[in-house]
């Protein structure tokens, strides 16, 4: 089996790993360019080119266990059931699940499983979600489908999970009105104010501007990264590219800010649709996953000390 960083590390026991990689090659509802089913394999393959030392430390030291890919040649309800079970397996092993999509729809059963796991211990508790994405994905239905990549955050909203959306630059009137009705449950900084702040905001870093919004979320968060949140000049291999996205250091600053304020209990990276011969996109995704692991490991260390 192809494992994350397989050129550098061997597979630890599932309960001796800080992270579980969960490959989810699910592609049912992609609306424009296809190919997300090839995402997980391409990211894992590209991870073999990573340096173990990420510039600050060795995120792999805590152990990275790669689960078998979720079987996606079943009906959607079965696939979602398996995603939930795999996410719970990671959490009950004491690991942070990191799902590799696949289309964005896969985040819903994973978020549901994380919420369920948390509530098994503390019934009144909740998770929050931080979303890096070009699209808000808040439509109730898309092409008559309640579980499309374009509706995933609406389904998460229905779970009562408060969210922070970052980098959105394509949104419908329906989605804007949901945001306006629920300012306490849907916080956001869209791409232009995030990356080209004006007035007072221009004097503050991304991390400074994010801090009060992150403080307003539950302490434990799920981080979902849609590859199209990044700028397509950097990462063109995604189904619905939008200009004006986050650059590399922007996304690192966001991830580090989230890890500094909240506890990231689960994460995913979705919507990579590899383009043959163009390796930068999958390598950037592999590097992003590894940097995310680094940010999580380092923040856990600083919190426990
Ligand atoms: Mn999305």
Image (cartoon, helix red, strand yellow):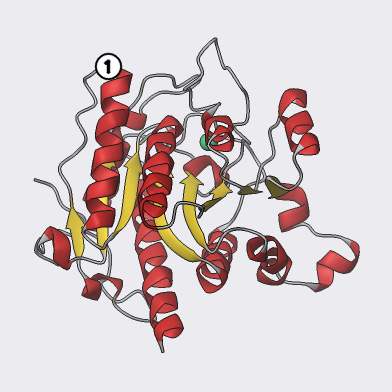
Residue at 29 percent across and 46 percent down: it is: 87
Q: Position of residue 189 (x, y in %)?
A: 72, 51
Residue placed farthest to the front in the image? 123
Q: Position of residue 186 (x, y in %)?
A: 68, 44
- 196 vs 233, left or right, is right
Please determine whether, in this image, residue 108 is positioned above or below residue 16.
above
Residue at 61 percent across and 47 percent down: it is: 162
Q: Position of residue 159 (x, y in %)?
A: 53, 37
Quarter location, residue 176: top right
Which of the two residues, 80 or 35, is positioned nearer the viewer here? 80
Q: Which residue is mark 1?
A: 75
- 135 vs 182, left or right, is left
Q: Residues within 10 Å of mark 1 (few under 14, many from 20)?
A: few
- 2 vs 106, left or right, is left
Q: Could you tell me if residue 44 is visible in this image?
A: no
- Quadrant in which the C terminus appears: bottom left
Residue at 82 percent across and 73 percent down: it is: 203
Residue placed farthest to the right in the image? 199
- Quadrant in which the N terminus appears: top left
């Amino acid at each position: 089996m192809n494992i994350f960083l397989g050129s550098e590390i061997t597979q630890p026991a599932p309960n001796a790993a800080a992270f579980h990689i969960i490959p989810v090659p699910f592609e049912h509802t992609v609306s424009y360019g296809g190919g997300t089913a090839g995402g997980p394999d391409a990211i894992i393959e590209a991870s073999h080119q990573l340096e173990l030392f990420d510039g600050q430390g060795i995120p792999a030291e805590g152990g990275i266990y790669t689960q078998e890919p979720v079987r996606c040649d079943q009906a959607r309800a079965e696939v979602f059931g398996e995603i939930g079970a795999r996410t719970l397996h990671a959490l009950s092993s004491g690991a942070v699940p990191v799902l590799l999509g696949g289309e964005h729809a896969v985040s819903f059963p994973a978020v549901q499983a994380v919420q369920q796991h948390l509530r098994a211990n503390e019934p009144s508790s909740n998770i929050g979600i931080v979303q890096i994405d070009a699209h808000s994905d808040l439509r109730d239905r898309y092409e008559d489908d309640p579980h499309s990549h374009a509706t995933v955050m609406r389904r998460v909203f229905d779970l009562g999970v408060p969210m922070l959306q970052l980098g959105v630059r394509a949104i419908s009137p329906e989605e804007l009105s949901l945001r306006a009705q629920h300012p306490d449950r849907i916080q956001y900084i869209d791409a232009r104010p995030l990356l080209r702040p004006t007035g007072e905001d221009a004097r503050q870093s991304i991390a400074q501007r994010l801090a009060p919004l992150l403080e307003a979320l539950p302490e434990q968060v799920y981080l979902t990264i849609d590859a199209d949140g990044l700028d397509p000049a950097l990462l063109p291999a995604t189904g619905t590219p939008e200009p004006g996205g986050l650059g590399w250091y922007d996304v690192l600053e966001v991830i580090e800010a989230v890890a500094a304020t909240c506890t990231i209990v689960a994460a995913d990276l979705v919507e990579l649709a590899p383009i043959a011969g163009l390796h930068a996109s999958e390598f950037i995704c592999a590097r992003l996953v590894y940097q995310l692991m680094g940010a999580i490991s380092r923040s856990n260390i600083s919190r426990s000390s």
